[in-house]
Image (spheres, rainbow, N blue to C red):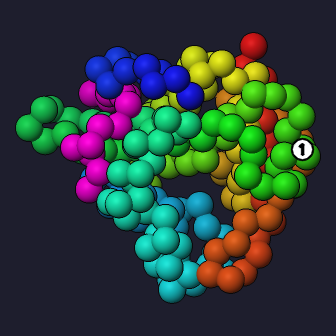
Amino acid sequence: MPAGLCENRDVTAVTELLIRRAEPADLSALADLAAETFPLACPPHTTPDAVADFVARNFTVAHFEGYLADADRVVLVAERGAEASTRLVGYTMLVGGEPGDADAAAAVTARPAVELSKFYTRADEHGGGIAGPLMAATLDAARASGAAVCWLGVNEENARAIRFYEKQGFEKIGRKHFTVGGRIENDWVLAQPLA
C-alpha cells in the first residue's frame, strides 16, 4: 500500500472517539489491546493456553513494530477520552497483496485485494457505537490503497461478528481454515467490492 495512505494526523471524530493511523508511540498499548481482544473472537473451545500461545506469536510489541513498518499494512486505532487519559478502544489491520491462504485466494477472485486481517474492539465498547465508524475509516483506507476488494476471514461460530460484517456490506464467498493452538478452525471468507 502507498506509504501516504491515511496519514498519521488524519482523524475522524465521533463524540469522544478518534480514529487514526497507529504510530510508534502506540506499540505497547496496541499489544495490550490485541492480547485483550483476540480471545473475544475465538470459539468457546479455544483453551487459555492456545490463546496465550497465539498472542505471544503474533501480538507482541515487536510484532506491532514490524506491522507498522510494513508498507503493505495499515493499522488504524480508535481511541476515546481527553488527551491526558486517552485509551485505545479498538484497532484494525489491513494487509495488501495476494491472499496468503490458498482457500481465500481461490474465493477472492477480484484483484488487487486487501485483507481486513484484524478488527477488534474492547468488550466494554461492544454496542457503544465505535464499530461502525471504525469500519468506515478502515474501508476508506482500503479504497485509498487502490484495492478492488476487501476480504476477511471470520470463525464460523462467531455469529455476532458475522452479523456485523454482513451489516457493513460484506458477503460470504467461501471458506478457509485457521489454526489456533494446533486446532484447525473453520472460517467463512467474506468480501466487499470497493468500487
The answer to which of 75 and 66 lies nearer the viewer is 66
Total residue callouts: 1
Q: Amino acid at mark 1?
A: Ala
- Residue sitting at x 91%, y 46%: 106
The answer to whether residue 24 is magenta is yes
Quadrant holding the N terminus: top right
Asked if residue 125 is positioned above or below residue 179 in the image, the reply reads above
Q: Quadrant of residue 182?
A: bottom right
> Where residue 195 appears, x then y in whole percent?
75, 13
- Say few, some or many: other residues with alpha carbon within 10 Å of mark 1 (under 14 / 14 to 19 / 20 or more): some
Q: Which corner quadrant of the image does residue 60 belong to?
A: bottom left
Residue at 60% across / 22% down in the picture?
145
133 with respect to 14 (left or right): right
Residue 83 in magenta stretch? no
Q: Which residue, given by chain and number where applicable, does mark 1 sit on?
A: 107
Numbered range of the magenta stretch: 15-28
Which element type, helix, strand or loop, lies under badge 1?
Answer: helix
**Residue 137 placed where, x, y %?**
50, 24
